[in-house]
Amino acid sequence: MRNSVKNFDAAPFDLTKVFDSVQSLHLANSPREKLVVILGATSTGKSSLALELARRFDTEIISADSMAVYKRFNVGTAKPTQADLERVPHHLINILDAEDKFSVGEFVRLARPIITALNLRGRIPIVAGGTGLYIQALVEGYELSAGKSLISHYKRTGELIYTAQIYGLTTERAELYDRINQRTEKMFADGLIDEVKSLLASGISPAAQAMRGIGYKEAVEYLQGDATLDETISKVAQATRNFAKRQLTWYRRMQYITWLKI
């Protein structure tokens, strides 16, 4: 984990420089549609930066989070607050029921026309989230061939399909783990157990797609009497740390990311 973070060769985070870079993207003359991407491991502040940029440049956010698509799954997914959703338009949040499945192909199919529509209005959309496969498939232009295999425009041509500024937020391992632990404790303090209890009481099955997310499956086990609350919190924190490792491993494939150390 420590080595994978250092290998990103991240520059110190400077919000003014980020603003300047996005402003330059606005002014750039390009035949391709424009896009800003904010990615990183869980708990690195992606949503906060996306909101800052969206307010500054009067634009909208497209969520690249495989769990935020589900309605009523709020606490465990760390969705933007209702105030944030009202302040800045968000897309691909709260669009599916718990039993529905969501895939990378569906994400790309839904995201592309939103990007086009915003560009036509003179706005640069901001894609923010931690699902690396979704973002990679979007910006690299993945398509299904006749033989049903994925073909990457980027791998064929060396170019992304968008004129994009892609930022990754990163930090040292100890700091990341501390952030994850704090976030986990906050989720439980904010009522994750009550949320899951309410979801189950409404008829949602523990086997539903959305219930397989980190935090939710562990909360179900707690409610079924299979673990204590302390054990459950510890399990969620550990699962989230493991997820962060997988995220960072995936991002190493994406050599076009500009890394910023928070």
Image: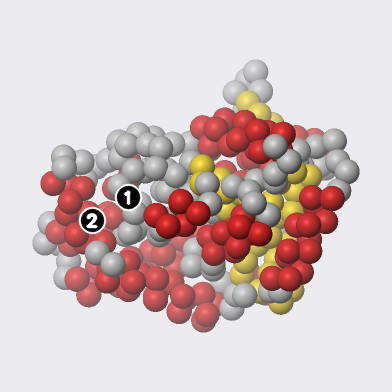
Foreground residue among 133 and 112: 112
> Which residue is painted at 60% across and 23% down in the image?
148
Q: Are marks 1 and 2 in contact (CB under 8 Å)?
A: yes
The numbered mark, 1 or 2, whose residue comes first in the sequence reads 1
Q: How is the image coloured?
A: secondary structure
Q: Which image quarter is the N terminus in? A: bottom right
Residue 51 in percent (x, y) is at: 56, 59
Residue 59 in percent (x, y) is at: 63, 48
Residue found at the far right of this picture:
29
Q: Amino acid at mark 2?
A: Glu
Q: Which image quarter is the C terminus in? A: bottom right
> Which residue is painted at 51% across and 46% down in the image?
90
> Which residue is painted at 69% across and 71% down in the image?
15
Label 2 neighbourhood size at 10 Å, few (<14), some (14-19), many (20+)? some
Which quarter of the figure has residue 7? bottom right
The answer to whether residue 7 is seen in the rendering is: no
Q: Amino acid at mark 1?
A: Phe
Q: CA distance from mark 1 to mark 2?
A: 8 Å
Q: Secondary structure at mark 1?
A: loop
Foreground residue among 149 and 101: 101
Residue at label 2?
195
Residue 223 in percent (x, y) is at: 14, 59
121 over 7 or under it: above or below: above
Residue at label 1?
73
Could you tell whether 123 is left or right of 54 in the image?
right
Q: Secondary structure at mark 2?
A: helix
The answer to whether residue 42 is seen in the rendering is: yes
Residue 231 in percent (x, y) is at: 23, 72
